[in-house]
Amino acid sequence: NAGVTQTPKFRVLKTGQSMTLLCAQDMNHEYMYWYRQDPGMGLRLIHYSVGEGTTAKGEVPDGYNVSRLKKQNFLLGLESAAPSQTSVYFCASSYAYEQYFGPGTRLTVT
Amino acid sequence: GEDVEQSLFLSVREGDSSVINCTYTDSSSTYLYWYKQEPGAGLQLLTYIFSNMDMKQDQRLTVLLNKKDKHLSLRIADTQTGDSAIYFCAEGNAGNNRKLIWGLGTSLAVNP
């Protein structure tokens, strides 16, 4: 039981490049979330999903897209990366209210 | 909108008790959580309390909830250097699609 895993762990992008972050969970959770964490800003919700095939916007969705084609996977896409998207990205999943987090992806956009 | 507030820093000596405080505004909170984040790692669920409880104890951790004042605290007894981390308070309610409202986190430094 791996819990929540995130791929990749680190990535450096140039401005304008695109990439996809993968989140996978093996706990059969319905709910999945993408957050970004920046110094002094705490955790901010980017997008979330309440079940396979659904997505919804969080508080900072601009510049990101998501997909939940399979229940166990939640993908976060950056179509045209900007330096303001330099951050640590966390994925989480939940069955009830408590959320279980992945180890994070550290993304730097130069 | 709803808000969760925490003090940003706390410094204690090894062996002392630590008390981390949190206030929230949502009067319909159902669950309140404490998460721990060690450097370079994800968030780990430490403990939680239902809104109809006043206290919950789990080994060295004691959670106190004052629902009238919307105040939550986490007490760590016999604090160790391994407890140095950022502690996040979060609250959730039934009407919010399982989304949690997060505090900014309290950085706990434990000095030997």
Image (cartoon, coloured by chain):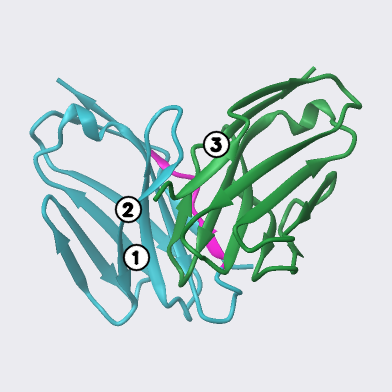
Tell me which segment is drawn in magenta: B99-106
**Numbered disc 3: secondary structure:** loop
Label count reads: 3
Q: Assess whether residue A23 is covered by the magenta stretch.
A: no
Of the two numbered discs 2 and 1 on the same chain, state the one appearing first in sequence: 2
User: Where the C terminus of chain A falls, by quadrant?
Assistant: top right
Q: What residue did someone put label 2 on?
A: B21
Report x, y in % for residue B96: 60, 75
Report x, y in % for residue B20: 29, 48
Q: Which mark is residue B71?
A: 1
Disc 1 chain ID: B
Same chain, marks 2 and 3?
Answer: no
Tell me if residue B35 comes above or below residue B95 in the rendering. Answer: above
In front: label 2 or label 3: 3
Q: Is residue B40 left or right of residue B84?
A: right
Write down the colour of chain B: cyan
Disc 2 chain ID: B
Q: Residue at x 38, y 66 (%)?
A: B32
Q: What residue did someone put label 3 on?
A: A104
Same chain, marks 2 and 1?
Answer: yes
Write down the colour of chain A: green
